[in-house]
């Protein structure tokens, strides 16, 4: 490359390493870059990384690739990573929530840092990278193991849901909660209970995070003796889809007999009929901030940012309580 440009190897190194200012003239820098483009030169990243002692690779740990939310998180993280010359490797837990085997012989040697969802926190134990910088997504900010946290305003999202339903006259609520033991779902449950007490009745039913699991749990709950709830608040759009399916099987109409709300605003929310009232979670922004936080930590900076705002999207699955009609 130096021979083709007619300059020294040191000059090529300074220009392609973006360290030429004040040491090489702008005209020479332009000439080196033009020559590199003409001859198709690409830097040897492996050699550069070995010299710098870094791989410029981040690991994103998620519960499952089949969940649209985490696919969007990856999109956001990869976008910011690419802007800074980083790559992002995905590490899904095989069972969707629990630990998986280490995908590397030594995570510590193959990675510069880890970004992990609280739903996949158990998988971190398998990595063996205790010394790696860790950024946690949607997790307890009081946890001391992470160098930074990126959270959504989950409690505020639940506040928006409850205020919407209370304004529609609902006073008998059922919380269709995810059976996944995760901080993010604990926060939603606590916020829902705090907002409804003492204004309404609240019952909680847990379900596997799947449409069939939610349908089965809801069929049993709605067929149980006692006053039927008029509003079903679900931890996730997938659970909400199962709740709507259970209502139809029992001859109930949504929202005439039963209002149903979700969380996430997945594509599923507008694919079901009626379309779901749900809380929109900006997943790509979560990924962007997660990668930005990791880059800040790697640069020795302290990452601080407010919770990412969320927004209730009102659609056709919520309406006035039957008694309020």
Image (spheres, rainbow, N blue to C red):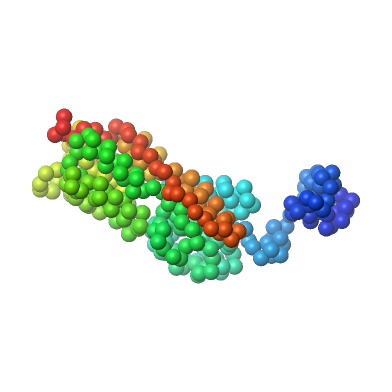
Count all numbered tags in the image, as a single digit.
0
Name the residue located 32 percent from the left edge and 59 percent from the top edge.
181
| Residue that extends furthest to the right in the rendered view of this protein | 6
Q: Quadrant of residue 12?
A: bottom right
Please indicate whether residue 81 sits to the left or right of residue 116 in the image: right
Name the residue located 78 percent from the left edge and 50 percent from the top edge.
21
| Residue that extends furthest to the left in the rendered view of this protein | 226
Name the residue located 41 percent from the left edge and 43 percent from the top edge.
309
Coordinates of residue 32 in the picture (x, y in percent): 82, 48
Q: Quadrant of residue 58?
A: bottom right
294 vs 106: above or below? above
As rendered, which of 245 and 287 lies closer to the eye? Answer: 287
| Quarter of the image where the C terminus is located | top left
Coordinates of residue 187 in the picture (x, y in percent): 32, 53
139 vs 311: above or below? below
Name the residue located 39 percent from the left edge and 42 percent from the top edge.
310
Note whether residue 94 is visible: no
Note whether residue 154 is visible: yes
Please indicate whether residue 247 sits to the left or right of residue 41 in the image: left
As rendered, which of 151 and 66 lies closer to the eye? Answer: 151
127 vs 82: above or below? below
Coordinates of residue 245 in the picture (x, y in percent): 26, 41
Coordinates of residue 254 in the picture (x, y in percent): 23, 35
């Amino acid at each position: 490359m130096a021979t083709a440009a007619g300059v020294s190897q040191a000059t090529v190194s300074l220009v392609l390493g973006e360290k030429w200012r004040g040491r090489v003239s702008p005209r020479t820098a332009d000439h080196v870059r033009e020559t590199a483009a003409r001859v198709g030169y690409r830097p040897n990243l492996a050699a550069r990384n070995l010299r710098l002692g870094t791989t410029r690779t981040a690991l994103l740990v998620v519960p499952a690739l089949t969940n649209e939310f985490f696919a969007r998180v990856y999109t956001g993280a990869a976008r910011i990573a690419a802007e800074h010359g980083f790559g992002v490797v995905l590490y899904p837990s095989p069972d969707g929530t629990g630990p998986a085997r280490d995908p590397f012989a030594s995570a510590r040697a193959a990675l510069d840092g880890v970004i992990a969802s609280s739903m996949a926190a158990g998988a971190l134990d398998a990595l063996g990278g205790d010394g790696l910088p860790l950024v946690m997504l949607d997790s307890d900010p009081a946890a001391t193991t992470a160098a930074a946290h990126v959270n959504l305003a989950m409690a505020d999202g639940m506040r928006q849901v409850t205020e919407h339903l209370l304004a529609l006259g609902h006073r008998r609520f059922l919380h269709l909660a995810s059976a996944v033991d995760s901080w993010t779902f604990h926060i939603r449950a606590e916020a829902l209970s705090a907002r409804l007490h003492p204004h309404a009745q609240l019952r909680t039913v847990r379900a596997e995070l799947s449409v069939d699991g939610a349908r089965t749990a809801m069929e049993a709950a709605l067929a149980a003796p006692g006053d039927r709830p008029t509003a079903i608040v679900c931890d996730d759009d997938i659970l909400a889809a199962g709740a709507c399916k259970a209502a139809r099987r029992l001859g109930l109409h949504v929202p005439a007999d039963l209002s149903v709300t979700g969380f996430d605003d997945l594509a599923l929310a507008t694919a079901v009929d009626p379309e779901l009232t749900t809380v929109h979670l900006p997943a790509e922004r979560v990924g962007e901030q997660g990668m930005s936080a990791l880059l800040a930590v790697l640069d020795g900076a302290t990452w601080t940012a407010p919770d990412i705002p969320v927004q209730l999207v009102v659609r056709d699955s919520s309406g006035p309580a039957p008694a309020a009609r």
